[in-house]
DNA sequence: CAGAAAACTGTAAACGTTTACATCATCTCG
DNA sequence: CGAGATGATGTAAACGTTTACAGTTTTCTG
């Protein structure tokens, strides 16, 4: 086990030579490289017997076409770029899973890059991807239109995920943040809570802002006051949830319910409350947002606003692929992922049951609302 | 908001033209493309005044070099391929975070692809990456040597992450699975438990096998029996943990402690026990493995075998980059990531405290053990 | 059997870069 | 003043593919 391998460089028996090009295959099969190429791709243009000869040679030499070279001429990379604001936590991991899965199914690869995309970093990321990707899935709740037109090449296929809406000429995909938050807070109010606090997402974050807006609207509609002290700033991290909950507990009159703008913060809050010796939901109710897989498993199980997270990634890629298929098409779709309130123990509702969405009006069969 | 954008294709004012090549820049600056290239890269070979002219032109035209074309000639893609068995859960997401972060810091991109890598899929993934990546981080607990030599081009830079050890000529990086599991089970035994069950990882998975081995060894050393009924097969998923725990509860004589081979299963088990009305740790103790971030947050907080997960990704990339730097070097390093038992409430130890590792003998300053 | 069509294959250009080499001024120095 | 050095730039080849076009052979048709 601890043996030091032979430091001499050697090609293992039966192992694969590093740089065998189509030229080698052609030579080996005694044909021109054009024929070799054809034999390997458009199989119908070449005599069956040469085709087999070429293929056999390719297999024997372990030939693998050089993707970079190929895409240089075909102008297709079969790769999509994925720009995420972060990679931490279950939310992004789920989105990424949906993205990768869908891309792979369509024979595409993913180049992923995570960064809080302010102007220069975004531009750098884009530069690095030029010529390597056919299109982009860009998730950036801090994205602005100004940024968009300045850095995205016109006509470059991009799907905006969770970006603030703008008139930017791209497809976009958003979560029903406002409605989701609204229904959660309405639910809490319906349970008799009068002091409902919120742990918000980061300032400048679009999702965060929308959820806050939903919270405010629900309070207003329920006739509840909305004192500033009940709005505490967070950043979507567990730590922020922990800290935020602690802060709320120090209030002279503490809230009876907390709406955390995402599950991560809700879980952090749960910990803080537990450490403070408070029982959830008896002493204080908690609701989250996103319904990450872990929400089911924490104790008490977390009431949350369900979002089909991996489907978000799937849809984004699907939209992108559709653009790639019809590059001329210049109508932009705007999809919104519907949310559902899923009631578990943490909010203290008598029985856990799924509540109908805020506006059951539109009897939609799909959870996706298209606004063209 | 719901407005339908103008379907006519138009270049937005100030927006970026799609395909501006170095040729355009050269023409605009009235120089040859060679000079343009030099002006943009090796700035010293060109007169300052032309350099500025070229750069100004490039900026004005929003020129971005075509990565594919560039790497065709330079034979450098500044991209690494990442093959993961899966993307689900915090473990992979953390690894990925470490990978992406380190790669980005070194100016590298990541192409990620997740798949349970049996022979043909692995080969397909590799084919798709040929000519697009400079090297590979391959995480595949089901990897075999046979697969390696047959599909990996000889001399192609690869770092094996969590792969079964073999004489394959590549750097490799593993978790101290055996020791970690051993120390956990020893700890449980030390707390007085005599019937300690294990929820194992998937069959054929190297990490799973090693952890099972550690479990068995610890039981043996503690003089405890190891009845087959206490070994229940899982697959690292929460659902498996849930199901496994239920199965254990049906035993005539139920275990007093459960060691789950990863935190995901431990968390699933927690849920099952809770639903069965059992208290953790009073009625039954639980320990996990990996110490994913969430371990702190569940209730009771999870005793686990700590692994610096994102560091795993970091180290893998670091190793790969070092290979890329010295392609001729043909000694292969084998690193092992040390683990630490972190005691929290779920195991029922009186006070939560960090226990020394199994073999404190080697007073290592770094948690990384190098076996050359 | 001539001619046309079809089937197959080869030649060469193209994709967007980088870079070895050649060229041509301009300078330096004896 | 001329030779050599220096510095700036251009020409062209190369990277590994695909594919338009042209060429050659075979097959078909009347």
Image: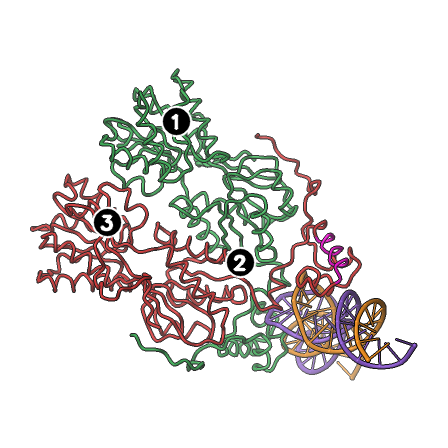
Chain colours: A red, B green, C purple, D orange
User: Going by the image, does C16 lie left or right of A211?
Assistant: right
Q: Looking at the rendered structure, which numbered label has been put on residue B81?
A: none
Could you say which is closer to the camera, residue B359 or residue B110? Answer: B110
Does mark 1 fall on the same chain as mark 2? Answer: no
Span shown in magenta: A47-58
State how far apart marks 3 and 2 are (Cα).
38 Å
Q: Is residue A132 above or below residue C13?
A: above
User: Going by the image, does B228 lie left or right of A260?
Assistant: right
Q: Of tags 3 and 2, which is closer to the observer?
A: 2
User: Going by the image, does B182 lie left or right of A281?
Assistant: right
Q: Of tags 3 and 1, which is closer to the observer?
A: 3
Could you say which is closer to the camera, residue B99 or residue A206? Answer: A206
State how far apart marks 3 and 1 are (Cα).
33 Å
Q: Mark 1 = which residue?
A: B183
Residue at 19% over, 40% down: A274
**Marks 2 and 3: in contact by CB < 8 Å?**
no
**Majority secondary structure of magenta residues:** helix
Q: State the quadrant of the C terminus of chain B.
A: top right
**Marks 1 and 2: in contact by CB < 8 Å?**
no
Mark 3 falls within which chain?
A: A
The x and y percentages for residue B147 are 61, 41
Q: Mark 3 = which residue?
A: A266
Tell me if residue B265 is in the magenta stretch.
Answer: no
Mark 1 falls within which chain?
A: B
Residue A341 position by quadrant: bottom left
Q: Mark 2 = which residue?
A: A107
Q: Residue furthest top?
A: B223
First of labels 3, 2 by sequence position: 2
Could you say which is closer to the camera, residue A166 or residue B174? Answer: A166
């Amino acid at each position: 086990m601890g043996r030091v391998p032979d430091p001499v460089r050697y090609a293992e028996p039966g192992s694969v030579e590093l740089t065998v090009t189509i030229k080698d295959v052609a030579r080996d099969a005694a044909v021109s490289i054009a024929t070799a190429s054809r034999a390997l791709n458009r199989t119908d243009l070449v005599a069956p017997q040469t085709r087999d000869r070429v293929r056999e040679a390719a297999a024997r030499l372990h030939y693998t076409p050089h993707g970079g070279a190929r895409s240089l001429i075909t102008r297709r990379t079969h790769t999509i770029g994925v720009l995420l604001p972060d990679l931490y936590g279950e939310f992004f991991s789920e989105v990424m899973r949906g993205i990768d899965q869908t891309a792979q199914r369509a024979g595409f690869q993913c180049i992923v890059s995570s960064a809080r995309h302010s102007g220069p970093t975004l531009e750098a990321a884009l530069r690095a991807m030029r010529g390597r990707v056919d299109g982009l899935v860009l998730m950036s709740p801090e994205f602005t239109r100004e940024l968009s037109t300045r850095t995205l090449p016109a006509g470059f296929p991009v799907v905006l995920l969770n970006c603030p809406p703008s008139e930017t000429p791209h497809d976009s995909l958003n979560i029903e943040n406002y409605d989701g938050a609204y229904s959660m807070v309405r639910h809490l109010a319906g349970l008799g809570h009068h002091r409902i606090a919120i742990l918000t997402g980061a300032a400048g974050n679009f999702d965060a802002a929308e959820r806050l807006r939903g919270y405010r609207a629900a309070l207003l509609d329920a006739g509840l006051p909305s004192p500033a002290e009940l709005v505490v700033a967070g950043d979507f991290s567990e730590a922020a949830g922990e800290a935020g909950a602690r802060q709320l507990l120090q209030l002279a009159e503490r809230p009876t319910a907390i709406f955390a703008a995402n599950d991560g913060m809700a879980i952090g809050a749960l910990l803080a409350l537990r450490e403070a010796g408070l029982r959830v939901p008896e002493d204080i109710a908690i609701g989250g947002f996103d319904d990450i897989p872990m929400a089911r498993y924490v104790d008490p199980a977390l009431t949350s606003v369900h979002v089909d997270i991996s489907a978000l990634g799937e849809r984004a890629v699907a939209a992108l692929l559709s653009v790639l298929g019809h590059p001329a098409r210049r109508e932009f779709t705007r999809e919104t992922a519907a949310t559902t309130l899923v009631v578990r123990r943490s909010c203290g509702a008598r029985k856990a049951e799924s509540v109908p969405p805020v506006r059951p009006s539109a009897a939609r069969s799909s959870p996706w609302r298209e606004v063209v």
